[in-house]
Amino acid sequence: EQKISAETLEKRRRSNLNGPLELYGMARGKNIIIVQLESVQDFLINLKIDGKPITPNLNKLAESSLYFPNVYTQVGKGNTSDAEFITNTSLYALGDIPMSSAVEGKTVPSLPRALGKLGYHSATFHANGASFWNRKNMYKSLGFDDYYDKQYFGTSDIISYGVSDEVMYQKTAEKLAEFHEKDKKFYADVIALSSHFPYHLPADKKKFAIQLPTRYNQSFIGSYIEAVSYADYAFGKFVSELKKWGLYDDTLLIVYGDHQGVQTKSSKDSELLQEIFGREYQNPLDHLNIPLIIKIPGVTEGKTIETTGGLVDIYPTAANILGLDIKKQMIFGTDLVNTKMNTIGIRFYTPTGTYITDSFHFSPGKTQDEGRVTSLKTRKTVPASPDSLNRMNQMLKYMKQSDRYVESLK
Ligand code: GP9
């Protein structure tokens, strides 16, 4: 098996980029806030139900940002914590073991480490305890300076595993304002929580969420949409807080969904999804599709970038906008602003060998003859061609190289 170097990866990335680089260094030296939204899928962005938007605050942000509607989750067994890992490293999750356990005790090259060299202070913010998902150890491996968890956020106004997103964002903004006052450039990795399964929004929070029509009553999809709508409300308050503290205009803000949230518990759920999509809900093209929004300080004109991407691409995309030099780092993703075409591998929630390109989704079968290709545009499925099977083998090699690299880290 061929060993790969950072240089080879960089060459591969470069050969697939449109030059000269767009948006390069546009947010150099700015503060960075990454917001990882729990269970938020892309179809909710700009969706209206009987005329009412579900995520008005995210929609508004997307209008003045780069919005990537074709990005997919790539998490494995570590779910939310895997999403944190992939975003901060541009390495594939191994799949059958949470990355927080896989890298315990190791030193992983990462976004917080790269920013640390430039004098940034890095911290994570999450309302649950940091021992959940072994995060405490993962944050150490990733080189974060600090984490703020349950101990900092307290136990008032609980939704699911921790304080409500409203409380979490408010206290996060206060802490960021403190960093700012002390003249510390910061990178904040904020992991929202309120829209966590099983999406039981407390009665006193319902007034902040979308009021769904009665046909959504007692449905799982209705509860999911309501919970995400509340998460959007709380996110909107975070944006106001950042503005209040004078942080918003000086910050690169990256927002994305960590992984899928929909479950079809009953035929009613399937019917509601059919109504929303105007066709059958598909896995993985609908199910694993998460939103990615990047707000560049000073840029007010929005742009939709259709390139297919995965969590693995967030770091290199941010690095281009920040003007960060990642040449010497093993980066398995690509810069979605400048890449000509992209292919991303997905496993664990889909059979190993699954990949998505800018035009199709490849699904491996048990035998080569059973491989299938689905067009992103028409959603029509046809048998896999030899070319698409070759691409699968290339993708598998690539993912293996990422795995070997993770295993080789000390
Ligand atoms: C709790 C939360 C759990 O801390 O992050 O995440 P999930 O169950 O979605 O992986």
Image: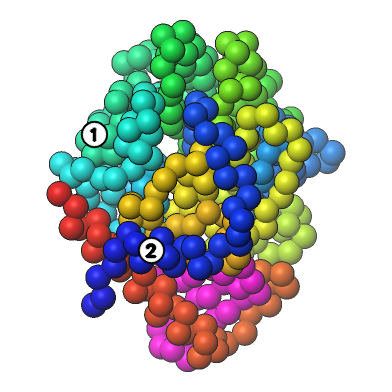
The reply, left or right, for residue 1 in relation to residue 86 is left
Q: Residue at x 63, y 22 (%)?
A: 249
Tag in front: 2 or 1: 2
| x then y, percent, for residue 386 | 50, 91
| x then y, percent, for residue 351 | 41, 70
Which region is colored magenta?
346-375
| x then y, percent, for residue 59 | 72, 37
Q: Which mark is residue 374?
A: none
Q: Which mark is residue 140?
A: 1
Coloration mode? rainbow
Residue 278, above or below 53: below
Q: Quick one: quadrant of the N terminus?
A: bottom left
| x then y, percent, for residue 219 | 63, 44
The reply, left or right, for residue 280 in relation to residue 357 is right
Q: Return the residue nearer the eye: 217 or 73.
A: 73
Say which amino acid is labelled 1.
Lys
Say which amino acid is labelled 2.
Leu
Q: Residue at x 37, y 73 (%)?
A: 396
**N-term-proximal mark, 2 vs 1:** 2
Tags 2 and 1 in contact by the CB under 8 Å rule? no
Quadrant of the rendered structure where residue 345 is?
Answer: bottom left
Q: State how many labels appear.
A: 2
Any magenta on residue 363? yes
The reply, left or right, for residue 203 in relation to residue 116 is right
Q: Residue at x 76, y 38 (%)?
A: 301
The reply, left or right, for residue 319 in relation to residue 332 is right
Q: Which residue is mark 2?
A: 9
Residue 259, above or below 353: above
